[in-house]
Amino acid sequence: MKKTMMTAIVGSILAGSVLAETQPDRVVEYKRVGETGLNLYIFNPAGHRPGDKAPAIVFFFGGGWVGGSPTQFYNQSRYLASRGMVAICADYRVKNRNHTSPKECVQDGKSAIRWVRKHADELGIDPNKIAAGGGSAGGHIAAAASVVKAFNEPGEDLGVSCRPNALVLFNPVFDNGPGGYGHGQVKEYWQAFSPLHNLDKDAVSTLVMLGTEDQLVPVATAKKYKAKMDQLGVRCDLLLYEGQPHGFFNSGSNYEQTVMAMDRFLTSLGFLKKSK
């Protein structure tokens, strides 16, 4: 897409001129645990119908596995829907609302992607073009769904893959090892939980966007992740935003720049069509 057109779309969303349109087109429950129902908030391209074969992306919000809201990625989702992609913001259990641990966050993330893939025909998406994205702990969930083999919901059909076909990650939590983010919360099982320590040749093409002044996810960690991906022969684009802190991506020009980067990455993979 030409930069001027992309900037106009992104700018109108950021300015709130299409605020009413940033509400999801559909809400569906993908999982129920006891009395807790977990929803997917779905943004469809114009004229989208069941039976279509659109690419899709599932976003997971940040919040340290403690809080947060699916609305964090509503604007990115409406933008991608305007580009022909089904964009989905997933709810998942967190400590403040559900008294859960980080393990359940990953379980729910895997469940969400499995549900989307299993219901691809109904949702009008291509089951082989499902990306995942997220910020901070949500980025961890997306990455873990790709490379972590444990923490599947008991009784779930593991014959349906939870592995996304690409990753779009905003200041993601990669390293849960000693000295890494959240190690104290996950120290009993960090080796099976940390994406950095579970990378393999089946990892998927990944875009990482990180501020150089992030105090929670060091640049060195992101570079180490990219180096491991490079060694495995898997694409990993690392974009560093000078002087930006953790959670920089949803404000001002940073929003516009990261959305443009996301567009270019997904276009390069064939998830989005090139502008004529």
Image (cartoon, rainbow, N blue to C red):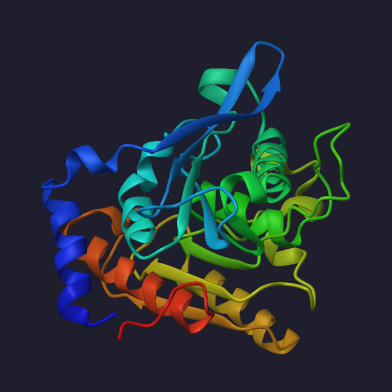
Q: From the viewer's perspective, is 125 left or right of 26?
A: right
| Most foreground residue, 196 or 183 | 196
Image coords of residue 37 (percent x, y) = 60, 20
Q: In this picture, is 177 found above or below 8?
A: above
Q: In this picture, is 94 found above or below 161?
A: above
The residue drawn where x is 14% and y is 56% is 12
Q: In this picture, is 251 found above or below 157?
A: below
Q: From the viewer's perspective, is 65 left or right of 204?
A: left
Image coords of residue 1 (percent x, y) = 29, 80
Image coords of residue 83 (percent x, y) = 36, 65
The residue most toward the top is: 35
| Most foreground residue, 215 or 57 | 57
Q: Please tell me in which quadrant of the rendered image residue 275 appears.
A: bottom left
Marker count (numbered) = 0
- Residue 35 at least partly seen: yes
The residue drawn where x is 75% and y is 65% is 197
The residue drawn where x is 66% and y is 87% is 230
Q: From the viewer's perspective, is 198 left or right of 266?
A: right
| Most foreground residue, 265 or 216 | 265
- Residue 180 at least partly seen: no
The quarter of the rendered structure image containing the C terminus is bottom left
Image coords of residue 157 (percent x, y) = 86, 41
| Most foreground residue, 49 or 19 | 49
